[in-house]
Amino acid sequence: MTNHDQNREFDPADTGSVVDRRTGVDRRAGESGTNLERRRGPGRRLTDWVRTAEEGEMTQEQQMFLHAIDTFKRVNEVSFPTWTDVLEVVRRLGYRKTMSSELNLNSRIEDWQEPSDAPSGVDRDEEEAPTRYRKAG
């Protein structure tokens, strides 16, 4: 390291996209307002939806989702389904995007709605099935 590098004053605003924890800047501060925050702190409590599930008292909807994911993993012989796999299970359970989003994604993607009777769009022919779902042998 040169003397120039050692004598240069540290400017926390000039760190680019990396946040140095030693500066005291909270890296999570920039992501507030998404309606996805689950971190707890003063004045922030778990919702009844989350609290009851964590205590082991799941709703029928939560039980059905977990059973569907477990069945998908067993049938397709995968331990860790991808997010696309999870979305496929959700759509096959009958969920459709019929309302405006309650999330603030900062215009990263345009919101849309679809009719409640829209097809899932996840059906495929046997020839199109990905190789990873086929049993070897």
Image (cartoon, rainbow, N blue to C red):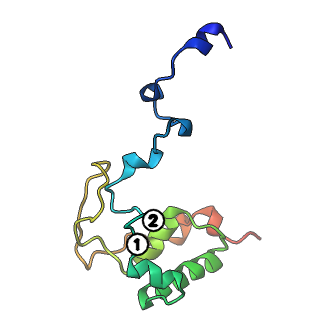
Residue type marked 2? Arg
- Who is closer to the viewer here, 85 or 61? 61
Q: Which residue is denoted by mark 1 in the rendering? A: 45
The reply to whether callout 2 and callout 1 are in contact (CB within 8 Å) is yes
Q: Secondary structure at mark 1?
A: loop
Residue 40 position in % (x across, y down): 45, 65
Which image quadrant is residue 71 in?
bottom right
Residue 75 lies, in percent from the top left, at 62, 79
Residue placed at 33% from the left, 62% from the top? 35
Q: Is residue 22 left or right of residue 94?
A: right
Residue designated by label 2: 40
* Side of 94 relative to 8 (left or right): left
- Residue 95 point in image, percent of width and height: 35, 77
Can I make out residue 124 in this image? no
Which numbered dot is residue 126?
Answer: none
User: Does label 2 or label 1 sit earlier along the sequence?
Assistant: 2
Q: Which residue is at the front of the view, 134 or 24? A: 24
Count neighbours of disc 1 (C-alpha within 10 A) and say few if under 14, some if 14 to 19, many if 20 or more.
few
Q: Look at 49% across and 63% down and name the residue there.
A: 84
The percent position of residue 60, horizontal first and vertical second, equals 43, 91
